[in-house]
Image (cartoon, helix red, strand yellow):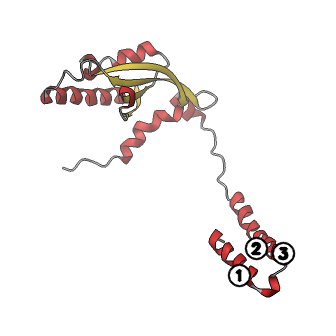
Amino acid sequence: MSHSGMKRIVQTLLQEPAMSSRSSILAILCTLLLGTAPLSATAQDAAPATPAYDAALAEKLGADERGMRPYVLAILKTGPRDAEITDREQRAALFTGHFANMTRLADAGHLVLAGPLGGEDGRRGLFILATPDIDTARQWVDTDPTVEAGVFVVEYSRYYGSAALMTVNDLHANLQKPAPQ
């Protein structure tokens, strides 16, 4: 029963002369509340079962015993040359290269997750890279034309997260609508 339905019943009961005593009202409220108890128990009984551990999947994704793995988080920040590069064609070429590089890294299994940030404190984007080693992540990210040109600078940090992140790119391909022909 909804909260508003219960409220209407209580208001009606309070207005009835025969229900003026608090004990009668409490008895009716208890009956109403107890009447909903089986619904709660049923909902708990219907809770989904815990999924079975998939050792092969955990191994494929590099998961440890907690289902986690190490990554490197790369934060792309506004670089020293961003404001200098104002030519539209040059910027378009740099960002075309930026997206092509991200696709290449994702296809190689190196780039797990990428996306733009809101620009606060110069933070413009993030990469999560499938390596525990910052030097390796730096080698991968340094191939990005926007980084090479100084549009972005990158800050790195080790990150420990769910190994399920390794499936994001495959899942995303099923969510993205094909481009119109």
The image quarter in which residue 77 lies: top left
Q: Is residue 145 left or right of residue 48?
A: left
Residue beneath disc 1? 12
Task: Tell me the CA gap for discs 2 and 3.
Answer: 15 Å
Tell me what residue is drawn at x 22 percent, y 23 percent: 83
Please state which amino acid type lies under the numbered disc 1: Thr
SS label for mark 1: helix
Which mark identifies residue 32?
Answer: 2
Residue at the top extreme? Answer: 135
Q: Assign a secondary structure to mark 2.
A: helix
Q: Quadrant of residue 100?
A: top left
Residue 110 position (above or below residue 17): above
CA–CA distance in space, label 1 to label 3 = 14 Å
Q: As shown in the figure, which amino acid type bears the numbered disc 3?
A: Arg
From the image, state whether disc 2 or disc 1 is nearer to you. Answer: 1
Q: Residues within 10 Å of mark 2 (few under 14, many from 20)?
A: some
Q: Nearer the viewer, residue 145 or 83?
A: 83
Mark 3 burial class by Cα count in 10 Å: few <14, some 14-19, many 20+ = few
- Residue 93, image x and y in percent? 17, 27
For the residues labelled 2 and 1, the Cα–Cα distance comes to 14 Å
Quadrant containing the N terminus in the rendered view: bottom right
Which three-letter amino acid code belongs to the residue tagged 2? Leu
Lateral position of residue 8 relative to residue 135, left or right: right
Q: Which residue is mark 3?
A: 22
- On screen, 102 above or below 44? above
| Tag 3 secondary structure | helix
User: Which of the pair 72/6 is nearer the observer?
Assistant: 6
Q: Choose the circle earlier in sequence order: 1 or 3.
A: 1
